Image (tube, rainbow, N blue to C red):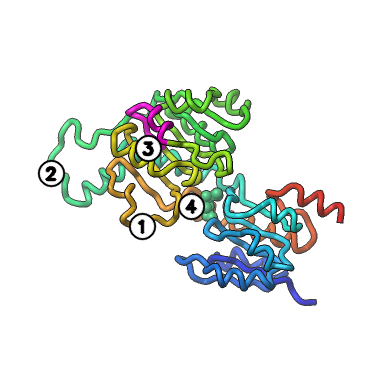
Amino acid sequence: MTKPYVFITRKLSDEAIQPLQEIAEVNMWNEEEKAVPREVLMEEVKKADAILTMLSDKIDKELMDTAPNLKVIANLAVGFDNIDVAYATEKGIAVCNTPDVLTDTTADLTFGLLLSTARRLVEAAEFVKNGEWKSWSPLLLAGHDIHHKTIGIVGMGKIGEAVAKRATGFDMEILYHNRSRNHSAEKRLGAIYTSFDDLISTSDFIVCLTPLTEQTKNLFTAESFKKMKKTAIFVNVSRGPVVDEDALYHALLNGEIAGAGLDVFVKEPIESNHPFLGLKNVVALPHIGSASTETRVTMMHLCCQNIELVLTNQNPKTLVNKDWLLLKKQN
Ligand code: 8YV
């Protein structure tokens, strides 16, 4: 019997894919720095039983229609806005993601970004590196305090809760807004549910962790930034399109808010002449929320395991489209 064919759209560690190689023929796009070109992916899916993919690959109808054997799409991320999940379900393809294993790593980065922006850590490090530190003065690179301030978390899922937990260590008041109430965060962490407008107008730090959906696209508008405190710091670790970037840029430029820590952008990667990079009050990161070696390797393993489970007729560990299970039972 011929082995199933798996295509991996980025270079992963040999150790992570080794178990998969025992049950499948595995082909991997080998360039670490460059995303697989669409034409290559379109060709590869024609023969693929499974693909291990990531955010930079658009897994849409056109692609799935050229993939007659495709049974499983494993996304190396908790978010799956790059995949047309409804269409995958229609076609009987399982869609898997990597929740839980990246929660703490992403929360650590979120808090690090909040701290870096508030206390101007990147600017200060550059200042020293550039030999500009000639003397001490009382307000040299003075930033904003974090402790005892109010953090407003938009999107109180698992990562939101982990960020709230870190905020309790800084004695912060925690507000949150979410599609539904998170009773565990209220009970365990003292988080207070508020409307979106109350959250943005009363928080000192507004942290965006909501997934990108039709409902959350452009959630943060020019109006939203106008409602924020002039001293507010906006942190985005979810997805760029949740924010109207032009509006954010003007809010930062005109002093409507004090700063922004951004790990995600509408179009990634951003160019070196991106307007945000000309602003001193912005800390920009290259989408590294879950990027610790330990966590990325664990995510790779989870993706490979999910593929192996589906290809051996078992249920994957972390399935996005739960209807796939129902369809599988019916067939
Ligand atoms: C991914 C992320 O690792 O999990 C997500 O949704 O944004 C990151 O953790 C990154 O997008 C690579 O696909």
Disc 3 residue type (three-letter): Leu
Q: From the top left corner, tell me how far across and down residue 247 is, in percent.
A: 38, 39
35 or 251, which lies in front?
A: 251
Q: From the top left corner, tell me how far across and down residue 273 is, in percent.
A: 31, 55
Residue visible at 36% across and 30% down?
Answer: 232
Task: Count neighbours of disc 4 (C-alpha within 10 A) and say few if under 14, some if 14 to 19, many if 20 or more.
Answer: some
Residue 134, numbered circle = 2
* Residue 200 visible within the image: yes
Residue sitting farthest toward the bottom: 1
Estimate the spatial distance between the alpha carbons at disc 2 and disc 1, rounded to whole Å.
32 Å
Q: Are marks 3 and 4 in contact (CB under 8 Å)?
A: no
Residue 35's place in the image compared with 166, above or below, is: below
Disc 4 residue type (three-letter): Ser
What residue is shown with label 3?
A: 115
Disc 1 residue type (three-letter): Glu
Task: Count neighbours of disc 3 (C-alpha within 10 A) and say few if under 14, some if 14 to 19, many if 20 or more.
Answer: some
Tell me which label, 1 or 4, sits earlier in the chain: 1
Q: From the top left corner, tell me how far across and down residue 259 is, in percent.
A: 34, 37
What residue is shown with label 4?
A: 292
Q: What is the secondary structure assignment of the residue under circle 3? A: helix
Residue visible at 50% across and 25% down?
Answer: 175
Estimate the spatial distance between the alpha carbons at disc 1 and disc 3, rounded to whole Å.
25 Å
